Amino acid sequence: MSHSTTPPDESTLSGLLHADRRIGNEHAAVHKPLHPSATFAFKTAKDLVAVFQGAQPGFVYARQGNPTTAALEAKITALEGGRGTACFTTGMSAITAVLLTLLRAGDHVVSSQFLFGNTSSLLQTLQGLGVSVSFVDATDAAHVQAALRPETRLVFVETIANPRTQVADLAGIGALCTDRGLVYVVDSTMTTPVLLRPREVGASLVVHSLSKGMGGHGHALGGSVTDTGLYDWSGYPNIAEPYRKGDPGNWGLQQIRKKGLRDMGATLRADDAHRIAIGIETMRLRVRQASANALALAQWLSLQPQVAAVHYPGLPGHAQHERAAGLLDQGFGPLMSFELQAGADVFTFLDALRLVILSSHLADNRTLAIPVAHTIFWEAGAERRAAMGIADGLIRLSVGIEDVADLQADLAQALSRI
Ligand SMILES: *Cc1c(COP(=O)(O)O)cnc(C)c1O
């Protein structure tokens, strides 16, 4: 529901920084103003009807979108090189909107088994609604291929998995999905458009938690779904009649937007859209700095006698290092995890940290640590944790943009306590 005239090229940093000003704001404001209005008024009944029926751009009621969120959506579309974007109140509501609006009972999904815990739990909810799900090791497209069935509709993967940092066979799965006409959903939260554009590996839909690296400052929740324009929705069976109108390129996102926002009400608030849009202005600088810090810390941690293993795609010993190096621009991202030597007390180490925060959040400006098995993957149980490669002593570190020497000093003094 973009209302701007010629969209500026926000895919470049300069374009992004000047995007709001160029669409023409009141008083020549450099930022798109905040529009908290719940509703929008029309001069004539004909105008009202035209906007309702989609014949004319505009806004009707803020559950379905507001101008501040639309400006953010235009920026994300440009950053991803996509066709259109719908924003939601959280990353989870964006993923829920995709899965609930595109799938029906009897459909089958192939998903990476290395998933954000809540996405994994959501897929289990879908199984209760009659959608079958196969969880496979998505680091090899052959595993995805072996799981396909005639009723498979969609493949879901994350770029760099949390917390063990497995890198999916993104291009291989993309080629497979293109060949089989499957919707390919890529959760690129860990990579952001700075490191990877999933359109280049054949993604149909790109999902982000905007709460993480996109916003970056840990002061707003949000999610987005971008249609890359690669999928041919005219052949997709689950598009409802009202959305099979006009250019088939718009059908998928139209249905996700109408059902996910209008019917399910998972609407991003204008003030959160504004904060996220401000965060995106510095995203490239932040992601580069966090990635450089993470690589330095991963290299240093792997030399420490108290550390048994470090999982980071930037390390040559990582199982998908070559793939990551080929796919990712400008760094390997902020996420790593590591295991202390057997017998070392994880809690003693974590409680000794002074600068690093104990927190479940990710890709923030501040460096965050969490014991994984006891917290974010506690509900999954020992068996699922084992399948995901999550040891009891695994610590997830989300590296921020602090001075790397300060971070290293903090980790060193905490390691010295164990
Ligand atoms: C955080 C996260 C989500 C969920 O996003 P929220 O905004 O917290 O709802 C989804 N996927 C990945 C990979 C995440 O890191």
Image (cartoon, grey):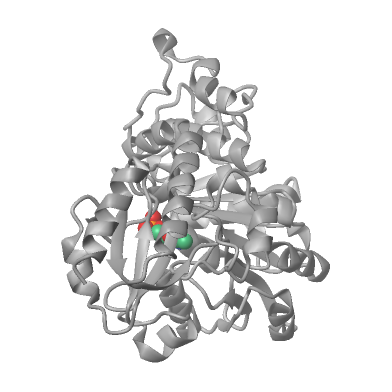
Residue 286's spot in the image, x, y percent? 44, 38
Q: Residue at x 41, y 66 (%)?
A: 337
Residue 283's spot in the image, x, y percent? 47, 37
For this rendering, which residue is in front, 325 or 13? Answer: 325
Residue 57's spot in the image, x, y percent? 57, 31
The quarter of the picture where residue 133 lies is bottom right
Vertical placement of residue 25 versus 45, above or below: above
The answer to whether residue 337 is left or right of residue 347 is right
Residue 194's spot in the image, x, y percent? 56, 42
Vertical placement of residue 31 versus 173, above or below: above
Q: Quadrant of the C terminus?
A: bottom left
Vertical placement of residue 220 versus 285, above or below: below
Q: Residue at x 62, y 49 (%)?
A: 196
Is residue 244 something one can see in this rendering?
Answer: no
For this rendering, which residue is in front, 270 or 238? Answer: 270
The quarter of the picture where residue 219 lies is top left
Tell which residue pokes out farthest to the top in this image: 27
For ligand 1, the image quadrant comes to bottom left
Q: Residue at x 68, y 65 (%)?
A: 183
Q: Quadrant of the N terminus?
A: top right
Vertical placement of residue 406 versus 59, above or below: below
Is residue 286 something one can see in this rendering?
Answer: yes
Q: Residue at x 34, y 40 (%)?
A: 403
Q: Count the marks: how many?
A: 0
Tell which residue pokes out farthest to the bottom in this image: 383
